[in-house]
Image (cartoon, grey):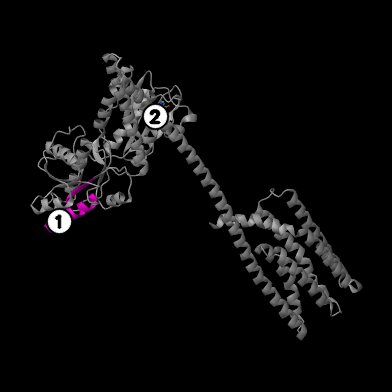
């Protein structure tokens, strides 16, 4: 807990504590006035001064009560600190009169008067300790005024018994100060405990609220998800049953089959969207940044959505740009695809713009997707980022999407280190934009437009593939072979080591994560790396391919510099990953697998 809130809490608690004793103090002081006047009465020394002193005492006591009344009437009229300071002032005025009045006792010929007056002062001091001891200011503006004149005058008499009395009084003065100090510490600890408890109670209540909201959101999520999943399944079930009906004409069968295919496609698309989002949520989606020309990516996504836009009579305008960015082109393409598909879906007339804008003096700039569509009401602008939330689709018509696009976009943009900004108003279109980092034209590896079939960077590379599934091994070998690689496919770690023994020195090792005999791909990769090192070869590019979503083992591997790709891996993604890894490997000084060099930690993922 920081000192500030504690001090404020102490002040809050002090005010009622200090003022609570004031009515009793008022009565006690009148009692003190009566007693003191009574003991001096038969022979009042310096009557004018006496009257002035005790008159002042009486007025100060009444003023103290008036202050108490004000505090009761207007407790929030002043800040707690101001009430505390006023109370200290009242103490100084109130206690200085009886404290100074002991001078009259020393003027009197009656030797027992100083003793009687001192007893009265000690009694008042005990009251001050009880009522004002919690606060330093209120304590020091009362006790010294009350006791110090008495101590000084007793010392000045120079008789044995008065000197002893002065010493005892001085000791009492010190002791009362020490006790008040520990009293204050205790008070502080009590207040700290109260504040901590209050803080805990408040944070518990806030957490409860968050948990309740999360549970509600989850319920909504499952309700919408199960509806959207059941709907096509239900349709497929009905359509499939109708295929068994012998009375239906073959033309009708073809139509039914076509419907089934479309429903399966919709289901597949929904599954992919849900999996994408789950992957993003679980934190396994990783980023691989490349330097590339943004215009190429714009052209690529633009060409996907131009026909849809044209079919609705909309123009899709892409602002020409020569900028090079440093970003993950695969993830960025998913962001732009989602935004453009929404722009086309929610625009009936006008145009859609895709462009790049410099961001002032910062390096990099904003990618912007703008449309002249229906726009989004202000009240919906936060909710549209919730999973399965759609503004105007209460029937959950799957043709109008599922409400997963924007949540995915927002998470992807955050993963890429940016923040999705939105500007939209009903009937005035929408603009979505986010920041991308500037890239270095000199570090562009290859054009994004390169076809997967071109093989300049993969030609002649030796690749060792480890997978216990023969069909995957066969598919992988065929694909890599088409790219010009020399492939050796093996089912396990033992045969991989054997291949190295036989002189196969790979430029890359691709390995499935779950292998037969409870071995993991990570173990196989480490064994292969060790074997290559022992044989005098340097580091090799390694790549794990896994179907697991989130596992601490995978995170640890990624941290150790073993890149991980999540299934399903598309040829384009595999190709781009391998090229990028080889490029990074070369940049670090490993021209081929036989050169020394360390492989940097790489983070990868993607669907394409
Ligand atoms: P979907 O488009 O599949 O419904 P999204 O998550 O992409 O799901 O969008 C959520 C909601 O936000 C949509 O239902 C739509 O109402 C609104 N929305 C998204 N983009 C736009 C846009 N460009 N113009 C108007 N409304 C939009």
209 relative to 137 in the view: left or right: left
Based on the picture, tell me whether residue 532 belongs to the magenta stretch: yes
Residue 111 visible in the picture: yes
Q: In the figure, 234 relative to 486: above or below?
A: above
245 relative to 391 in the view: left or right: left
Q: Which residue is mark 2?
A: 230
Q: Say which element carries label 2.
A: helix
Q: In the figure, 396 relative to 492: above or below?
A: above
Q: Which residue is mark 1?
A: 531
Quadrant where the image shows the C terminus: top left
Indicate which label's residue lies in the foreground, 2 or 1: 2
Q: Where in the figure is residue 4, as x and y percent of width and height?
A: 56, 55
Which of the two residues, 594 or 106, is positioned nearer the viewer here? 594
Based on the picture, tell me whether residue 298 belongs to the magenta stretch: no
Which of the two residues, 167 or 240, is positioned nearer the viewer here? 240
Q: Residue at horizontal 41%, vertical 24%?
A: 397
The crowding category of the residue bearing disc 2, from other C-alpha atoms within 10 Å (few below 14, some 14 to 19, many at least 20), is few
Disc assigned to residue 188: none
Q: Is mark 2 within 8 Å of ligand 1?
A: no
Residue 359 visible in the picture: no
Ligand 1 image position (quadrant): top left
Q: In the figure, 158 relative to 318: above or below?
A: below
Q: CA distance from mark 2 to mark 1?
A: 51 Å
Residue closest to the far left: 502
Residue closest to the far front: 246
* Segment colored magenta: 520-544
> Considering only order in the chain, which callout, 1 or 2, is on the residue closer to the N terminus?
2
Q: Residue at horizontal 14%, vertical 34%?
A: 454
Q: Where in the figure is residue 227, as x and y percent of width and height?
A: 42, 29
Q: Say which element carries label 1.
A: helix
């Amino acid at each position: 807990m920081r000192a500030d809130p504690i001090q404020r809490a102490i002040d809050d608690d002090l005010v009622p504590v200090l003022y609570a004793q004031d009515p009793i103090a008022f009565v006690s002081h009148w009692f003190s006035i009566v007693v003191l006047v009574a003991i001096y009465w038969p022979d009042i020394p310096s009557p004018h001064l006496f009257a002035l002193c005790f008159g002042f005492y009486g007025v100060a006591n009444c003023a103290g009560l008036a202050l108490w009344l004000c505090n009761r009437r207007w407790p929030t009229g002043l800040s707690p600190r101001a009430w505390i300071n006023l109370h200290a002032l009242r103490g100084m005025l109130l206690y200085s009169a009886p404290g100074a009045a002991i001078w009259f006792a020393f003027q009197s010929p009656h030797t027992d008067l100083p003793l009687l007056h001192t007893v009265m002062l000690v009694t008042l001091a005990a009251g001050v300790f009880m009522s004002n001891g919690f606060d330093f200011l209120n304590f020091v503006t009362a006790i010294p005024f009350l006791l110090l004149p008495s101590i000084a005058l007793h010392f000045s008499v120079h008789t044995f018994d008065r000197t002893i009395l002065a010493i005892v009084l001085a000791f009492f003065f010190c002791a009362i100060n020490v006790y008040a100090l520990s009293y204050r510490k205790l008070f502080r600890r009590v207040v700290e405990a109260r504040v901590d408890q209050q803080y805990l109670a408040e944070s518990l209540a806030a957490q409860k609220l968050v948990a309740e909201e999360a549970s509600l959101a989850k319920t909504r999520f499952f309700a919408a998800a199960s509806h959207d999943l059941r709907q096509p399944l239900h349709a497929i079930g009905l359509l499939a049953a109708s295929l068994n009906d012998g009375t239906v004409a073959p033309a009708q069968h073809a139509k039914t089959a076509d419907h089934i295919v479309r429903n399966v496609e919709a289901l597949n698309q929904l599954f992919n969207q849900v999996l994408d989002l789950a992957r993003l949520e679980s934190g396994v989606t990783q980023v691989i940044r490349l330097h590339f020309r943004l215009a190429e990516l714009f052209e690529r996504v633009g060409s996907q959505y131009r026909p849809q836009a044209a079919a609705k009579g909309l123009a899709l305008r892409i602002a020409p740009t020569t900028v090079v960015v440093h970003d993950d082109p695969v993830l960025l393409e998913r962001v732009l695809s989602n935004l453009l598909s929404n722009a086309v879906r929610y625009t009936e007339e006008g145009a859609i713009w895709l462009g790049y804008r410099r961001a002032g003096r910062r390096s990099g700039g904003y990618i912007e997707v703008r449309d002249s569509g229906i726009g989004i009401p202000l009240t919906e602008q936060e909710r549209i980022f919730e999973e399965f939330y759609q503004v105007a689709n209460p029937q959950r018509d799957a043709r109008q999407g599922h409400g997963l696009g924007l949540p995915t976009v927002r998470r992807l943009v955050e993963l890429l280190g940016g923040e999705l900004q939105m500007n939209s108003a009903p009937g005035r279109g929408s603009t979505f934009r986010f920041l991308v980092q500037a890239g270095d034209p000199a570090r562009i590896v290859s054009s994004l437009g390169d076809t997967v079939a071109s093989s300049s960077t993969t030609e002649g590379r030796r690749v060792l593939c480890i997978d216990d599934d023969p069909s995957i091994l066969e598919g992988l070998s065929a694909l890599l072979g088409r790219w010009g690689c020399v492939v050796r496919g093996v089912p396990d770690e033992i045969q991989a080591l054997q291949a190295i023994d036989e002189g196969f020195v790979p430029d890359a090792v691709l390995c499935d994560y779950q292998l037969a005999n409870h071995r993991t791909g990570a173990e196989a990769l480490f064994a292969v790396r060790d074997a290559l090192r022992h044989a005098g070869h340097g580091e090799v590019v390694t790549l794990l391919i896994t179907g697991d979503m989130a596992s601490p083992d995978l995170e640890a591997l990624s941290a150790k510099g073993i890149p991980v790709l999540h299934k399903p891996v598309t040829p384009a993604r595999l190709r781009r990953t391998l090229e990028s890894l080889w490029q990074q490997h070369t940049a670090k000084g490993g021209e081929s697998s036989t050169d020394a060099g360390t492989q940097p930690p790489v983070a990868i993922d993607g669907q394409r």
